[in-house]
Amino acid sequence: MQELIGKIKDKLSETFNFEYATVRELEHKCFRVFYFVAGMVGLGFLLWITSLFAIIGIPLMVLGMILFFVTLVWMLRLQREPTREVRCPYCASRNELFVSRKEFTCDMCHRPVGVLPSGELVKLLTPEEEEARFEERTRVKRHQI
């Protein structure tokens, strides 16, 4: 039960974490919010038609509708930010990157990519790769001693 609650908390915090670097990532995050809002409105409607819980259902539906429109306006405003098309150095897939971002995760291969001030893309290490390199360096140092 604790694991299920933890997973739900993680999913909710991931849903409302509005850090994004590419247009596709922004769209995915906004659609997750829309799914959450649709659930709120649907649950509110079910509570409302039972009449017994209308006091909870009606405010839930109204809150869901307000959150829907706020998210929609927010998403449309953010999509006006300038973008540029870049190719991932790992898989060569096309990503629409917001100009102000200094690093991003590829939409296709999900690997980290850095953007230099010149606009050039560089491969970044994943946490697993960094850990493996650290372990390799410490193992080599032990053998040298």
Image: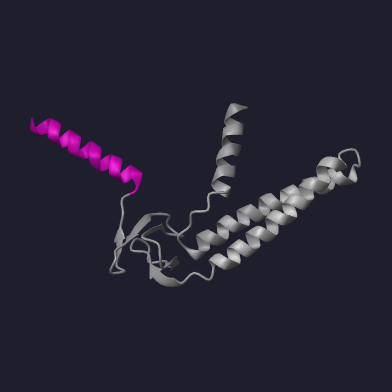
Residue 55: name its quadrant: top right
Residue 2, x across and y down, in percent: 59, 27
Q: What stretch is highlighted in magenta?
A: 126-145
Quadrant holding the C terminus: top left
Left/right placement of residue 61 relative to residue 135 reads right
Main secondary structure of the magenta stretch: helix
Residue at x 24%, y 42% (from the top left corner):
133
Residue farthest along the left direction in this orientation: 145
Q: From the viewer's perspective, is 30 left or right of 103?
A: right
Is 17 placed above or below 106 here? Answer: above
Residue 116 coordinates in the image, percent (x, y): 29, 63
Residue at x 86%, y 39% (from the top left corner): 53
Depth order, front residue of 27/4: 27
Name the quarter where the N terminus is drawn. Answer: top right
Measuring from the top left, give residue 45's x and y in whole percent: 83, 49
Q: Is residue 130 magenta?
A: yes
